[in-house]
Image (spheres, helix red, strand yellow):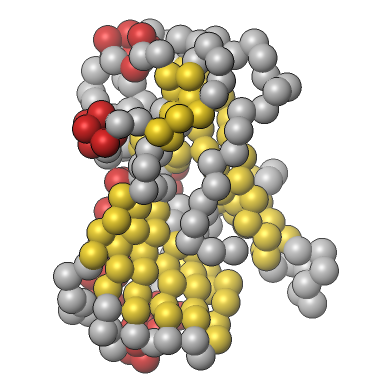
């Protein structure tokens, strides 16, 4: 549990992925913890990478508005995507956080605890932690899909963390409903991609990474 995500390596069991036929997709789930007092409550964060085939004429999942053939198909690497909240399309993986300091922690805590879109997974005096499930929460065979995190430290510092720009937009809109907050400090983590031929992971140069931080498309895929 926590706001930091580890991008897993590609599974060796999928050596036959079509290099120019789709996207890698990064998912995060909450699963039941058999050791918990209430095993029905999700308690373990699990991460998974899947492969989404995309036809050449389809809209590119990166959010450019171009067809896949005219956009990411020819790139020498995969930049993973992740599902947008509510499964409304996908967004490029671009981990980021927004930190608000000197907040009214007691009032924020009360409002977030009442928000049905959030699930509180930890509530202690020095740290409270919520994950964004949405309303309604979306379940799959692997668990409940997570779309971002909110952490309140010592009732003074509020941190929103997301894997994409589209997810961060939803989190910031949610926090705007809580009340007036000071301007956040925004941090963008390095963007990692996978070489299509070698499957090795590497970080994009800063300038190239900045060009790849685009919101995802607001459309559903089967």
Residue 46 visible in the shown view: yes
Q: Quadrant of residue 111?
A: bottom left
Front one among 215 and 13: 13
Image position, residue 165 (x, y; %): 30, 46
| Quadrant hosting residue 192 | top left
Classify 207 as above or below 152: above
- Residue 205 spot, x, y in % from top left: 30, 31
**Residue 47's spot in the image, x, y percent?**
61, 46
Q: Is residue 69 above or below residue 94?
A: above
Q: Nearer the viewer, residue 35 or 222?
A: 35
Residue shown at 53% from the left, 11% from the top: 197
As drawn, is 113 to the left or to the right of 190?
right
The residue positioned 34% from the left and 79% from the top of the image is 157
Q: Is residue 24 left or right of residue 60?
A: right
Is residue 5 or residue 177 the one in the foreground? 5
Rendered residue at 49%/70% (across/down): 130
């Amino acid at each position: 549990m926590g706001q930091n995500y580890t991008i897993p390596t590609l599974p060796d069991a999928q050596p036959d992925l079509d290099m120019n036929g789709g996207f890698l997709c990064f998912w995060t789930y909450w699963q039941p913890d058999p050791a918990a007092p209430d095993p029905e409550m999700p308690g373990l964060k699990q991460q998974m990478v899947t492969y989404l085939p995309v036809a050449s004429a389809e809209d590119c999942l990166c959010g450019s508005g171009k067809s896949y053939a005219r956009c990411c198909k020819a790139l020498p690497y995969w930049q993973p995507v992740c599902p947008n909240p509510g499964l409304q399309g996908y967004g490029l993986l671009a981990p980021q956080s927004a930190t608000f300091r000197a907040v009214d922690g007691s009032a924020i805590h009360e409002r977030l605890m009442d928000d049905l879109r959030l699930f509180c997974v930890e509530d202690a005096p020095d740290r409270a932690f919520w994950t964004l499930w949405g309303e309604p929460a979306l379940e799959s065979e692997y668990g409940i899909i997570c779309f971002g995190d909110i952490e309140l430290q010592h009732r003074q510092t509020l941190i929103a963390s997301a894997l994409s720009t589209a997810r961060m937009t939803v989190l910031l809109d949610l926090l705007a409903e809580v009340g007036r907050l000071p301007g956040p400090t925004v941090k963008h983590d390095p963007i990692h991609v996978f070489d299509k031929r070698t499957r090795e992971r590497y970080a994009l140069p800063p300038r190239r990474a900045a060009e790849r931080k685009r919101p995802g498309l607001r459309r559903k895929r089967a």
